Amino acid sequence: MLRKEITESIKRFLECFVILLGLPIAFLLDRLIMKFGWEFKDLFLGLFYVAVFFYSAYSGITILQAEKKDRALEYLLSMPISRSKIMLMKIFSRLIILIFCIFILAFLVEFRTFQMLTIWLIFLFFISVTFSMIIDSIILGIMGISLIFLVFELNSRILFFLVGKTDIEGSLDFLALLSPVLSALLLLIPFGISFWLTFKKMDVKPMTQQIQPYYYIAFPALVIILSFIILYYKDSMTKLMNQ
């Protein structure tokens, strides 16, 4: 099974990074027509950003796509392997490629940018995995993940504002990393619990009948976070814009 998951992960990687094949064309168009003066390295970095971010979300949201497409969920669930091992193999095969991409970024960007990108990419991957259970359409899934990422970013900025008002020892750089980590955990924990409770008890019934944990855990947690953002948005954004 692990070999199959590695093959699927490589397919997802190639589907996302095919965009890099357009790099020479983009460079020539800039030199001949658009004339923005972009360097080849800048174009590569921009396209690489797009590819790795898309892979992070796409590989997560499609983690069960092969089984759903081939109607093989029943076979997957009947395998003589614990469901935790099944999910571990699926996540590991995709995550190892993402870590490889992050490793490349370490050589392309400055350290502080690399830290933030790592947090964003890891968050995107795992929140996308949790969405794979409740959304079959890749387009709707990407839209939902984008909205969740916006919530994550707004929550990170507000937490930075609130934590920054306290007397916690440490530099602003530490707080700038602490706030997105806290924001990621506030979203990943309820969605992750909902995903696992659903997958652990999943059977051949329609998925709409099996996602109660999302109704009782993930969605209420999301509403609470949105309420928190609305409550503190004006003051925190005004404060951050004035810094």
Image (spheres, rainbow, N blue to C red):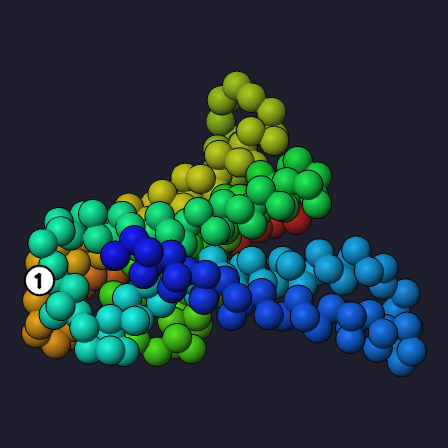
Residue 155: percent from left, percent from top: 45, 49
Could you say which is closer to the camera, residue 64 or residue 234? Answer: 64
Numbered-mark total: 1
The picture places residue 142, in percent across and down from the top left corner, at 43, 70
Task: Please determine whether, in this image, residue 236 is positioned above or below residue 130.
Answer: above
**Residue at screen point 20% across, 47% down:** 85
**Within-10-Å neighbours for mark 1: few <14, some 14–19, many 20+:** few
Q: Residue at x 73, y 60 (%)?
A: 44
In which quadrant of the rendered view does residue 50 lie? Answer: bottom right
Q: Quadrant of the C terminus?
A: top right
Position of the N terminus by quadrant: bottom left
Front-most of residues 55 and 148 = 55
Q: How far across and down, in percent of the image, does residue 39 sit? A: 85, 59
Q: Residue at x 85, y 63 (%)?
A: 38
Regarding residue 37, the answer to whether it shows in the image is: yes
Residue closer to the observer: 206 or 67? 67
Q: Amino acid at mark 1?
A: Ser
Residue furthest front as drawn: 3
Q: Residue at the spot x=74%, y=68% of the render?
A: 23
Whether residue 217 is visible: no
Residue at the extreme bottom: 33
74 displayed left or right of 132 = left
Quadrant in the picture for residue 199: bottom left
Is 119 displayed left or right of 131 in the figure?
Answer: right
Residue placed under numbered mark 1 in the picture: 78
Disc 1 on helix, strand or loop? helix
Q: Please, is residue 174 above or below residue 207 in the view?
A: above
Q: As drawn, is 35 to the left or to the right of 189?
A: right
Q: Residue furthest top?
A: 169
Q: Is residue 206 left or right of residue 63?
A: left
Horizontal and vertical percent position of residue 62: 35, 67
